[in-house]
Image (spheres, rainbow, N blue to C red):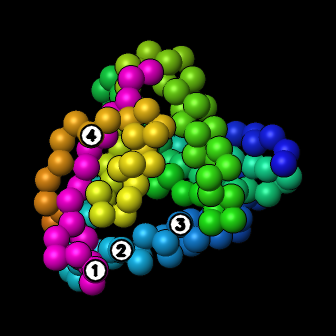
Amino acid sequence: MSAIAIRDVTERDAPQVAEVVRSGVATLRETYRPRPGAALPALPPRARLVAVRDGRVVGTVEHFREGDRVHLVGLFVDERSRRCGVARALIAELLGRARALGARRLSLYTIRESGNVAVFERLGFQVVEEHDDLYMASDRHAGLHEAYMERGT
């Protein structure tokens, strides 16, 4: 298996990024989906990184700076490339960029019932706060819980 390269997204990446996001969202939709009529909070402008292996985009994450942290949004790995170090490589790149910016931590939100809390814990994040999620619904779970997680840089 070849090395994973992390870089800023380009316009040429758009179709492959869309496919990685589609794959990731499809997996999440097995657990939850937006509540009808729920308006998600607006986010500031974000930058996007891609993970590339063998010339193909296999992962992506958006991020933005907020105070002393870099916040991650929508970290997705193509289902065929999961458990191969793609998310770890994206996080490692974000850690380096956050340090260079003087940010002290990375942060993110995730839904506990998706199983992603454990994934992010393996990547060095800890749950800082958790509450009932108001924006998502599930056919599998009576209630969903949003976890706010952080990791020092």
Which numbered tag is attached to residue 31?
2
Magenta stretch contains residue 144: yes
Disc 3: CA contacts within 10 A as few (<14), some (14-19) or many (>=20): some
Q: Where is residue 33 drawn, in percent x and y?
A: 33, 76
Residue at screen point 32% across, 35% down? 126
Q: Earlier in the sequence, mark 2 or mark 4?
A: 2
Disc 4: CA contacts within 10 A as few (<14), some (14-19) or many (>=20): many
Numbered disc in front, either 3 or 2: 2
Rendering quarter of residue 76: bottom right
**Element type where label 1 sits in the image:** loop
Which numbered tag is attached to residue 11?
none
Which numbered tag is attached to residue 127?
4
Viewer-proximal residue, 106 or 68? 106
Q: Where is residue 45 drawn, in percent x and y?
A: 43, 47
Quarter of the figure that contains the C terminus? top left
Magenta highlight range: 135-153
**Element type where label 3 sits in the image:** helix
Q: Real-space Cα distance between discs 3 and 1?
A: 18 Å
Q: Real-space Cα distance between discs 3 and 2?
A: 12 Å
Q: Is residue 53 above or below residue 93?
A: below
Judging by the rendered image, the residue that carries numbered circle 1 is: 140
Judging by the rendered image, the residue that carries numbered circle 3 is: 24
